[in-house]
Image (cartoon, rainbow, N blue to C red):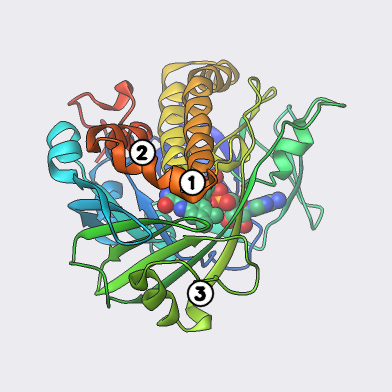
Amino acid sequence: MINGLRVVIAGGGVGGLTLAGMLTRRGAEVTVLERAHEMRQGFGLTMWPNAFLALRQVGGEAMYKAVCEVSQSMTRLRYRLGSGRLVADIDLTSTLVRQYGEPGYAVTRIELLEALASQAGTEVRYGAEVTDASPDGTVTLADGEVLHADVVIGADGAGSRVRAAIAPPGRPEPESRRLLGWQGVVPRLLTPSQTEAEVYFGPTGSSGMFPLPNGRTYWFLLDPNRDRPRLDGWHEAIRGMVEATPAVSMHRDEARDRPADPDWGAGRVTLLGDAAHPFLPTAGQGACIAMEDAAVLTRRLEGHSDPVAALRRFERDRFRRVRHVLRVSRRLHGMQQLRPAFMRHAGLVVTPTPVITRMYGAPTFPIPEFLGRDRAGVS
Ligand SMILES: Cc1cc2nc3c(=O)[nH]c(=O)nc-3n(C[C@H](O)[C@H](O)[C@H](O)COP(=O)(O)OP(=O)(O)OC[C@H]3O[C@@H](n4cnc5c(N)ncnc54)[C@H](O)[C@@H]3O)c2cc1C
């Protein structure tokens, strides 16, 4: 039962804003607390059918359309070796659209957040840092303000304060892996077309370029160098793209993954998105899974009269899915780091396209819950 439920969401990122929109549409009284003083910048994201179907089914047409309007759909994705040699040419129309009705998309983070905020149904409170949360539904802010809620959602990212606040004393931290990535947005220069994307495997892992709306291209390059991406050994298409990007349009981000705790909530508190289960970006799924979480959590709250039981059910239902995505993203990372490089490249050359499609594509397939034809119950 959601109507009238008092919900506090810590974090106004992709997961928090998606959840806010889904819950306010069902009559919840939602407060979104965001530590930053303004919306987080950051560059591109690729988004896949699993996220878009969850958004459409549970968020409804208006939310879905708002996100579609700022996203560029993609029709092809090509994987290449650093030399430019093609290893897989994936027609996203026949692999994804035909099965799920959705292709892949590329979007800038800021435009995605703006679209989600416009649909959140509540004003985000910027500059509101959560410092503590308790299983009884009490939330404390850095300025001493205390809020009480029926449910509290920690959507506050990989370094979640909410997760730390509800952790059982002495719980060991699971092993985490790190990856540095560079990203940039440039006017479309070298990408093959308006709707085609390319991913190259090179000396430090992978690098990709994706079309964005309004004649722009988003690129990423996984590279541990902290000063500037090193371009030795990369294909000229990647070098040209990075060299054409002014320093102000380039951004470095560190991703850190962590296996989810099987019981990641406590009492009236649960976690969602990176707060519960950060991934390495090798599978391009962190934001997608945060949206999926928001949709499943909304459905569980809708389906239970006891909100605490709904939170526990949500955690149980998500655990296997997020464990799978963590494994895939680690496996892809391991493959991209395989040494010597010729072994890695030889492996890719002999791997048939359907296998590569499956390897990269599996996490992007919608979960059964969102494959149904019934659309949302909200509009
Ligand atoms: C280089 C790179 C590339 C990526 N590419 C992709 C991709 O292509 N596709 C994809 O799906 N994912 C991708 N990801 C992952 C994706 O960015 C994250 O998984 C996603 O942003 C998680 O969303 P979230 O809402 O859980 O957390 P976040 O986006 O981190 O949002 C958390 C919010 O909580 C706020 N916050 C933090 N602490 C507090 C506090 N104490 N109180 C209040 N607010 C707080 C933060 O300011 C932030 O706004 C990529 C990540 C990286 C690093």
Query: Is label 1 or label 2 in front?
Result: 1
- Residue at 87% over, 26% down: 170
Identity of the residue drawn at 54% across and 36% down: 330
Residue at point 18%, 67% (across, down): 193
Disc 1 residue crowd, few under 14, some 14–19, many 20+, Cα 10 Å: many
Q: Amino acid at mark 2?
A: Tyr
Check disc 3 and report the residue beneath it. 250
Q: Secondary structure at mark 2?
A: helix
Q: Which quarter of the rendered picture does the N terminus lie within?
A: top left
Please provide percent x and percent y for residue 73.
22, 55
- Circles 1 and 2 in contact, beta carbons < 8 Å: no
Q: Is residue 58 above or below residue 286?
A: above
- Crowd tier of the residue under label 3, counting other residues whose Cα lies within 10 Å: few below 14, some 14–19, many 20 or above: some
The residue type indicated by label 1 comes to Gln
Q: CA distance from mark 1 to mark 2?
A: 12 Å
Q: Secondary structure at mark 3?
A: strand
| Distance from Cα at disc 3 to Cα at disc 2 | 26 Å
Residue located at (27% from left, 58% from top): 197
Relative to 242, is 340 on the left or the right? right
Q: Nearer the viewer, mark 3 or mark 2?
A: 2
Q: Position of residue 318 (x, y in %)?
A: 49, 24
How far across and down, in percent of the image, does residue 75 sit? 17, 52
How many other residues sit within 10 Å of disc 2, few (<14), some (14-19) or many (≥20)?
A: some
Query: Which of pointers 3 and 1 lies earlier in the amino acid sequence?
Result: 3
Q: Quadrant of residue 212?
A: bottom left
Q: Position of residue 191 (x, y in %)?
A: 25, 69
Indicate which disc residue 336 carries. 1
Observer-nearest residue: 53 or 146?
53
Between disc 1 and disc 2, whose residue precedes?
1
Q: Which residue is mark 2?
A: 360
